[in-house]
Image: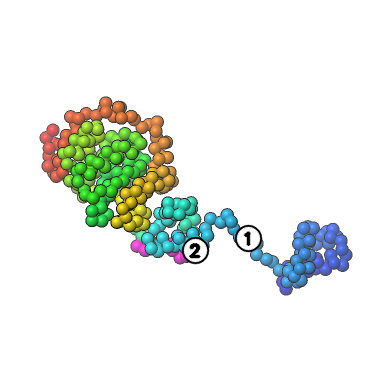
């Protein structure tokens, strides 16, 4: 028996001898509730009841992380190699569980899963940039998912609002269909489309379609995917968070892609936006966003000729003018 147990036993014995709780409390400098607690425990369990007991609750109905949630987190880390931010997004999308990245990281730390194997460190010199107005520049690219499955994506440089589509081939006709979808689904007018130098973007029909809608065409230099970095990173997100959980041959894959686009734009927090979703960023900048008629008035078709896919030829033609 330690000193605290001996002291408590002394309180109980004094009370049993005097039957005066006030006297015992004044002599020992304790409160009446404290004395009553130890007397009840002594009556119920004897001297063993005077030991300290754990104050941990028997059940925690408000606890965020249960054993089932911890198992989901560890499974996503081991099978899909996801970081804490992506795991947090996947818990919300697939299981409707709202859990912050720091909470996810605590679970990983407790299970010795602090770092991903071969984790890539960011360069210290890297700088983020974004256009100041929604629709000022929209990055567009195509990614091959599987044979006969081409993933088109368009990402707004300012708000990261994203439109996606799945097509069987990478052609000019499918590019125009996707552009029509981008015009319809993006909640702001588009001033410029930025792409790599793929043939599907340089088709004359595609460029004429852009001219008809008063949209400027801005292809990037060859071998410079970093200039289209936002849509390139968007492809990685789609592959790791969406296609990794889907059956490519599912006949309802396009419907699932629409659901993923809805989640991405309206619910998924974006680190470059300070934890806001793209739709929240759009609402913040709505007063600064111009209207279509304003952009059409500023568009000069004489300064937007048909571009050549071959970079050196295109550059030479531009210098002649």
Q: Please tell me which residue lies in front, 297 or 119.
A: 297
- State the CA–CA distance, disc 1 to disc 2: 21 Å
Q: Write down the quadrant of residue 133 in the picture.
A: top left
Most extreme residue toward the bottom is: 1
Residue 128 at what x, y percent from top left? 34, 45
Q: Which residues are magenta?
A: 109-118
Q: Secondary structure at mark 1?
A: loop
Q: Specify whether residue 239 is in view.
A: no
- Mark 1 crowd level (few <14, some 14–19, many ≥20, 10 Å Cα): few
Most extreme residue toward the right is: 18
Q: Please tell me which residue lies in front, 191 or 185.
A: 185
Q: Is residue 68 magenta?
A: no
Q: Secondary structure at mark 2?
A: helix
Label disc, if present, on residue 110 of the rendered structure: 2
**Residue in view at x 42 percent, y 36 percent:** 284
Q: Earlier in the sequence, mark 1 or mark 2?
A: 1
Residue 23 at what x, y percent from top left? 86, 60
Label disc, if present, on residue 71 of the rendered structure: none
Residue 226 at what x, y percent from top left? 27, 48
Q: Write down the quadrant of residue 301 in the picture.
A: top left
> Magenta stretch: dominant SS?
loop
Q: Specify whether residue 110 is in view.
A: yes
Looking at the rendering, in which quadrant would you find the C terminus?
top left
């Amino acid at each position: 028996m330690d000193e605290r147990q001996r002291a408590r036993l002394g309180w109980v014995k004094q009370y049993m001898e005097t039957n005066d709780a006030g006297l015992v409390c004044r002599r020992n400098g304790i409160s009446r509730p404290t004395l009553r607690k130890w007397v009840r425990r002594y009556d119920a369990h004897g001297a063993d009841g005077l030991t300290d007991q754990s104050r941990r609750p028997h059940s925690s109905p408000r606890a965020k992380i249960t054993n089932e949630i911890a198992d989901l987190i560890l499974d996503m880390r081991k099978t899909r190699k996801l970081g804490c931010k992506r795991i947090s997004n996947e818990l919300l999308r697939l299981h409707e569980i709202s859990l912050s990245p720091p909470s996810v990281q605590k679970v990983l730390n407790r299970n010795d899963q602090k770092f991903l194997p071969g984790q890539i460190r960011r360069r210290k010199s890297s700088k983020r940039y974004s256009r100041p107005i929604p629709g000022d520049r929209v990055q567009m690219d195509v990614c091959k998912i599987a044979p006969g499955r081409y993933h088109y994506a368009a990402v707004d440089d300012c708000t990261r609002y994203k439109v996606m589509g799945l097509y069987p081939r990478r052609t000019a006709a499918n590019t125009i269909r996707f552009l029509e979808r981008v015009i319809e689904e993006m909640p702001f007018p588009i001033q410029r489309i930025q792409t790599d130098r793929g043939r599907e973007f340089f088709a004359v029909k595609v460029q004429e379609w852009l001219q008809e809608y008063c949209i400027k065409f801005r292809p990037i230099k060859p071998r410079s995917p970093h200039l289209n970095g936002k849509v390139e990173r968007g492809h990685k997100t789609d592959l790791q968070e969406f296609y990794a959980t889907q059956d490519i041959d599912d006949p309802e894959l396009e419907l699932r892609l629409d659901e993923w686009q809805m989640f991405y734009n309206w619910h998924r927090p974006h680190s470059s936006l300070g934890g806001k979703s793209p739709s929240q960023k759009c609402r913040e900048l709505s007063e600064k966003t111009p209207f279509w008629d304003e952009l059409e008035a500023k568009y000069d078709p004489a300064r937007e000729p048909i571009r050549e896919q071959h970079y050196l030829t295109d550059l030479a033609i531009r210098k002649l003018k």
